[in-house]
Amino acid sequence: MTQAVTQYSLAELMICAAAEAFREDGEVLATGIGVIPRLAASLAMKTFNPDLMMTDSEAYLLSEPNPIGNRGDDFVQANETWMGFSRIFDNVWSGKRHAMVGPTQIDKYGQANISALGSDYHKPKVQMLGVRGFPGNSISHGNSFFVPSHNKRVFVEGECDMVASIGYNPERLPKGYSLDDIDIRLVITDLCVMDWKGPNHSLRLMSLHPGVTLEQVKENTGFELSIPDTVGVTPAPTAEQLAIIAQLDPHNIRAKQLKDNPPGDRSANAREQAKEAV
């Protein structure tokens, strides 16, 4: 029987929600960019998808995900085999990878930007990382998005200032591609969970985090969302999941990834219960 949990952080809720992105993947390389996506992939591997492959960016495939932070001198990671750069690229191009990435901008097509902000690409207001692996990754394998702060600066009106990855924009499809070849999966934010299965591959709301309203999501998104007749609530973490997350992140680094890391349930009743508990 699953034990009900009433108190958990927003970071922990998002880790559990993001883990669902990897549920049906089977034996693919899971790459979580950033603390919460990495913990999400590790949680998926430790619970419902033990076939996931992980490197934790340390050049070995692991049979057990590494905890994050200082591991102590006596820690021995569970190496399965060597996974150097050449094998990574073979894996990427074969499509046997699922990355969860954190774009700076996302538009209504699912196109993402990590390169530069501003209307003039030659004189950007903000210069960021460059496109890095986004173009090749987005056309080669599945990707999900992690957004720690859901707002209109991320979910922009119109196209991204610089399109760094492929999306469901028919005007930008490479020769020989169709919209059905594009594989963008879940979008996990601090307000909700979404996917790209709305009409014409539009961004569809799947669930609201506890205590978050539909109006909050609409007000913080720069384009129209597909809203189903029934929108669920993002499930709370189970006691088992929280215990595994604590093992994977013994130093609670997850708490520093979100501003103030509020309670995962932001409803009025939950806030009152939290005050009483204190």
Image (cartoon, rainbow, N blue to C red):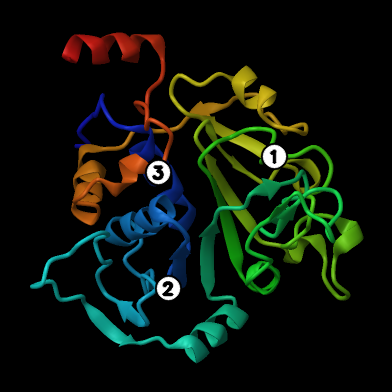
Q: Residue at x 49, y 87 (%)?
A: 85
Give how far apart the Cα atoms at labels 3 and 2 are: 28 Å
Q: How many marks?
A: 3
Quadrant position of residue 50: bottom left
Quadrant position of residue 153: top right
Say which label, 1 or 3, has the lower sequence index: 1
Say which label, 3 or 2, has the lower sequence index: 2
Camera-nearest residue between 179 and 14? 14
Specify few, some or many for label 2: CA neighbours under 10 Å numbering under 14, 14-19, or 20 or more.
some
Looking at the picture, how far across and down is residue 245, in whole percent? 25, 49
Mark 3 near mark 2, Cβ–Cβ under 8 Å?
Answer: no
Specify few, some or many for label 3: CA neighbours under 10 Å numbering under 14, 14-19, or 20 or more.
some
Q: Residue at x 63, y 72 (%)?
A: 133
Q: Which mark is residue 231?
A: none
- Residue annotated with mark 2: 27
**Badge 3 amino acid:** Gln
Question: If the image is split into quadrants, where does the N terminus sit?
Answer: top left
**Badge 2 amino acid:** Glu
- Residue annotated with mark 3: 257
Q: Residue at x 30, y 8 (%)?
A: 272
Q: Secondary structure at mark 1?
A: loop
Give how far apart the Cα atoms at labels 1 and 3 are: 20 Å
Q: Residue at x 10, y 72 (%)?
A: 73
**Badge 1 amino acid:** Phe
Question: If the image is split into quadrants, where does the C terminus sit?
Answer: top left
Q: Which mark is residue 155?
A: 1
